Image (cartoon, rainbow, N blue to C red):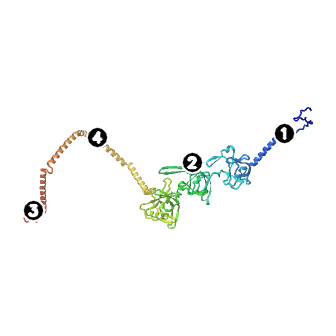
Amino acid sequence: MNDLPPDIHGQPPAVLSDPRVSRRRRLSLIWAIPVITALIGGWLLWDTLSKLGPTITITFQSAEGLQVNQSHVKHKDVDMGTVSAIELTPDRNRVQVKVEMRRAAAPLLTEGAQFWVVRPRFFAGSLSGLETLVSGSYIELSPATDRNAPSKRDFVGLEEPPVQTADVPGRTFLLQAGRIGSINLGSPVYFRDLDVGTVLGWDLGDMAQNVTLHVFVRAPFDQYVHNNSRFWNASGFSVKLGAEGVQFQIESLKAVLLGGIAFDTPPVKPSAVVSAADTKFHLFDSRELAEAAAYSWRVPLVSYFQGSVRGLAAGAPVELYGIRVGQVTDVRLQYDSKSDQIVVPVHYEVEPQRIADSELVPAEAVKDRIAQDVDHGLRAQLEAASLLTGQKLISLDIVAHAPPAHIAMEGEAIVLPTSPGGGFDSMTQAASEVLAKVNAIPFEQIGANLNETLAGINQLANGQELRDSLASLHATLNDTQDLVKRLDAGMQPALKQLPAIASGLQDTVAHTNKLLDSLDRNYAGNSTFGRDLNRLLAQLNDAASSIRVLADLLTRHPEALIRGRTDTGLQ
């Protein structure tokens, strides 16, 4: 054991003492499992604590569709928290939903944030939330638009989803209307047939005299809303019967089903100012009324019509030569203390801007111009606007040979004289007069006389005298028939000789014509016979004169036949 080789320096190796064996304690691999588990748990705890955000409370009417530890809060489909508890409020009328929010959602929990439950529903004309049929209902978060808003931890949830979320660019405007018709929450807003916005809601205006609608117009269409823009109710459809035929117009099928609002802006300068948010506009009932509102210059008039004004109501058109120039504003009964009678003043407005070159007449000269037109026969007349509905309108026409009249003032309104209406009204009046004359005919008396006449005829027809007369007539007819038969039998030979007689008559006529020609030649006025005949006639005339003188003499002196004529003459 001691024969060891020398080291590298040639030295004999040192003698080693006896070795000591010691056992070193080593860590077992089984302890790696709890260490790794602890590390993972710690990491998970750190990750959970690092992501854990504030706890908020949301109050709803019902917790339908929500489940603890299963329902989530989402924003743009990103998980923002989980429902941790659901319990009733102290008054037991609502439910409180506690939500453990993530740390990333903390900046979104500010004043103005909105929460609502997403579930399948039909809203604003469309189906939404169908995906929750598989995944289950969840709570949607819509942050406030103001990023500097103060933080908040207690919220009141919405029972219905908002019509327009706050992150959509655009502006909200206020529309004031007397009635909203079929306009509803979520109804569309149209600009030149384009869907550019929606109705957010409404509330009552001042003194509950009108309803204020909140409408949202998306960008960039909100840039087309100016102070002179006109909004009107585009719900339903309209049917017009004109010279071009029947016109059927709708804004869109969606507007028919859900109601809608449309607006338009007249051409403006590029430098025109865009309306600010929450600017108030008037909501007109129709496009025609909205277009009429562009005429800002209105002249108030009033007329008193004789007779009934049935069919004339506020909004009825006022026409000049068949073209609309205004509308009726008021029709009502009024007691006139001067005449102690009930009168019907009809107030209406004329818009001179509808007439070309109306700016040539200044506003202060309108009264004088109307007075001149009245002197030339301008009158207000009632005419039928529709034969089917019986509606009437006011027609301003120049009436020929109209009685002299003058205008007057009634407050700020000009009193315009009236004239009986023409057209269909005149026909109706003429028909009424004809019916009055027809009613004046004594039909009852005529009927009684006719009945008496018919009774006499009936008595005569059924009397014995008529029967006897008919019997005599029958016998006479039989005798006449026998006579005709005998004449017919006797005339047969004469009829057979008619051709020979006719031939003889022709010869006689020919000889007569020759005789007349001979007399004309021999005894005409220029013939010898004619001259002799004229002399004979003259002599006969002289003889007749002598005879007439002799007869006259004998008439006065009949004794002359015996004594003769003396030299001294007859005394």
Which residue carries the number 2 mark? 253
Q: Write the residue at 34% across / 47% down.
A: 469
Residue nearest the observer in this picture, 261 or 267: 267
Q: Secondary structure at mark 2?
A: helix
Q: Is residue 58 positioned above or below 549 on the image?
A: above
Given the image, on which type of amino acid does mark 2 rest? Leu
In space, the residues marked 4 and 3 are separated at their CA atoms by 74 Å
Describe residue 182's horizontal placement relative to residue 76 as left or right: left
**Where is residue 537 shown, x and y percent of the image?**
13, 54
Given the image, on which type of amino acid does mark 1 rest? Ser
Sort mark 2 into few (<14), some (14-19) or many (20+) by Cα contacts within 10 Å.
few
**Where is residue 454 shown, x and y percent of the image?**
40, 51
Q: Earlier in the sequence, mark 3 or mark 1?
A: 1
Which residue carries the number 3 mark? 560
In space, the residues marked 1 and 2 are separated at their CA atoms by 79 Å
Instruction: Say if mark 3 contacts mark 2, CB within 8 Å.
Output: no
Instruction: Say if mark 3 contacts mark 1, CB within 8 Å.
Output: no
Which residue carries the number 4 mark? 485
Q: Residue furthest front?
A: 10
Residue nearest the observer in this picture, 387 or 464: 387
Q: How many marks?
A: 4
- Of tags 4 and 3, the one toward the viewer is 3
Q: Is residue 29 positioned above or below 553 on the image?
A: above
Q: Earlier in the sequence, mark 4 or mark 3?
A: 4
Instruction: Say if mark 4 contacts mark 1, CB within 8 Å.
Output: no
**Where is residue 553 shown, x and y percent of the image?**
12, 62
- Of tags 3 and 1, the one toward the viewer is 1
Residue 499 tag number = none
Residue 28 tag number = 1
